[in-house]
Structures are given as structure tokens and as C-alpha cells.
């Protein structure tokens, strides 16, 4: 209604705009969409803060990783403003050793140069890394960049049906990984 068009017209406008920038940094950029659509995107995000929540298995999994001596790095395409809003309304930041946004690197996770920035910034050996994501193209980008282990998360949105992955193993509960972390070593 802000631009005097029907809902169907607005949806077609957004779909066409999405298709033009899919897989690029603009796709994830709130400032870009605010300019393109003429809408207060951050204002819209703030109206949805009651929906911001972590998966119930996230914090126990991150804590188990810490106890196992593993580094926990959030690797995201989220815009810094959106990420700040999520961190403000969750305990996620307290359980991480680092964060990197594609907006900090100038490249989305789909791009090889993103991974080069990640490895350099955190002095990571990709052959010792596990990358978990809900996007098959991004999991593939991680694999092509040399990340040794990729895992799909099949239920990133509790309001939507489970996702399936063609080329990657997938899980719907971090508890499955947590059990391996907290078992005492075998002698």
C-alpha cells in the first residue's frame, strides 16, 4: 500500500528484484533493499523481534564445543544491522569465539574470496573445519573452498517443512552432534 500497488504486484516486484541479485552481497544487504524497494527494512525487522529466537539445541551444542576445546565462529551473510538485532535479543554472542559477516569481507559466502577472508582472519586450517548451513549452494561453496566437513541443517525454520540435501548429509537436531562431543574418550 505504500506504493499504491496490489499485494500481487508487490510480490512480483520483489521476486523480480530478488532474481536479479540472487547469490550476490546485495541479496543480503538491508541498505540495498531499503533503497530498491523504498521501504524501511530495519523498521520492519524491529517489528518482528518477538520472532527472534535460537534453536533449543544451539546453546547446549555451542557449550559442548567449548568444553571440547573447539572454536565456535559464526559465519553469516546477515547484514550487520540485522545481526546486531539478533544478538541483542539472544544469548548467542556469549557462546561464540568469533563472528564474520560477508558484509565485512565484501563477498557473500557463495564466493571463494569470502572463504579466503575467513581462513586468514581466524587463522583456520580448512581441513580441520566443520561448516553447518541450511543452504546447499553455500555448503558447496565451503567444500570448494577446502572446508573438510559440511553438514546441512534440515529444519532452519520451525514454521516450514524439513529441507533435504542432495549432496550433503543433513541433521535436524544438534543433540546428535553434542552426544559425540560429551562422551568420554575411549581408552
Image: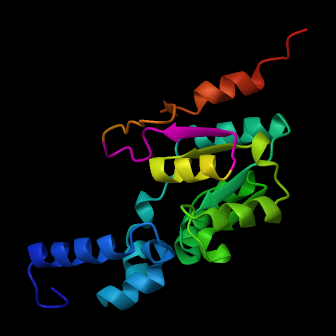
Q: Nearer the viewer, residue 164 or 66?
A: 164
Please indicate whether residue 24 sits to the left or right of residue 151 in the image: left
Q: Position of residue 46 (x, y in %)?
A: 43, 74
Please indicate whether residue 166 sits to the left or right of residue 132 in the image: left
Please indicate whether residue 109 sits to the left or right of residue 94 in the image: left
Q: Position of residue 123 (x, y in %)?
A: 85, 58
Q: Position of residue 72 (x, y in %)?
A: 74, 49
Q: Which residues are magenta?
A: 146-160
Tell me the residue at 57%/64% (across/down). 111
Tell me where residue 33 sits by quadrant. bottom left
Query: Does the magenta stretch mainly form a helix, a strand or a loop?
Result: loop
Q: Position of residue 154 (x, y in %)?
A: 44, 38
- Determine the residue located farthest toward the right in the rendered image: 187
Tell me where residue 60 sits by quadrant. top right
Q: Quadrant of the C terminus?
A: top right
Q: Is residue 8 magenta?
A: no
Image mark count: 0
Residue 49 lies, with reference to residue 53, above or below; the image says below
Amino acid at each position: 500500500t505504500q506504493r499504491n500497488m496490489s499485494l500481487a504486484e508487490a510480490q512480483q516486484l520483489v521476486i523480480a528484484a530478488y532474481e536479479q541479485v540472487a547469490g550476490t552481497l546485495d541479496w543480503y544487504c538491508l541498505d540495498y533493499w531499503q533503497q530498491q524497494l523504498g521501504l524501511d527494512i530495519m523498521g520492519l525487522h524491529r517489528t518482528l523481534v518477538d520472532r527472534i529466537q535460537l534453536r533449543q539445541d544451539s546453546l547446549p551444542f555451542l557449550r559442548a564445543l567449548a568444553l571440547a576445546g573447539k572454536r565456535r565462529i559464526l559465519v553469516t551473510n546477515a547484514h550487520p544491522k540485522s545481526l546486531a538485532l539478533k544478538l541483542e535479543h539472544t544469548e548467542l554472542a556469549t557462546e561464540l569465539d568469533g563472528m564474520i559477516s560477508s558484509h565485512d569481507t565484501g563477498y557473500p559466502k557463495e564466493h571463494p574470496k569470502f572463504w579466503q577472508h575467513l581462513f586468514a582472519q581466524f587463522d583456520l586450517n580448512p581441513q580441520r573445519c566443520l561448516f553447518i548451513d541450511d543452504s546447499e549452494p553455500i555448503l558447496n561453496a565451503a567444500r570448494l573452498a577446502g572446508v573438510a566437513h559440511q553438514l546441512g541443517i534440515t529444519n532452519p525454520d520451525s514454521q516450514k517443512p524439513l529441507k533435504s540435501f542432495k549432496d550433503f548429509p543433513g541433521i535436524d537436531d544438534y543433540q546428535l552432534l553434542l552426544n559425540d562431543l560429551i562422551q568420554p574418550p575411549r581408552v
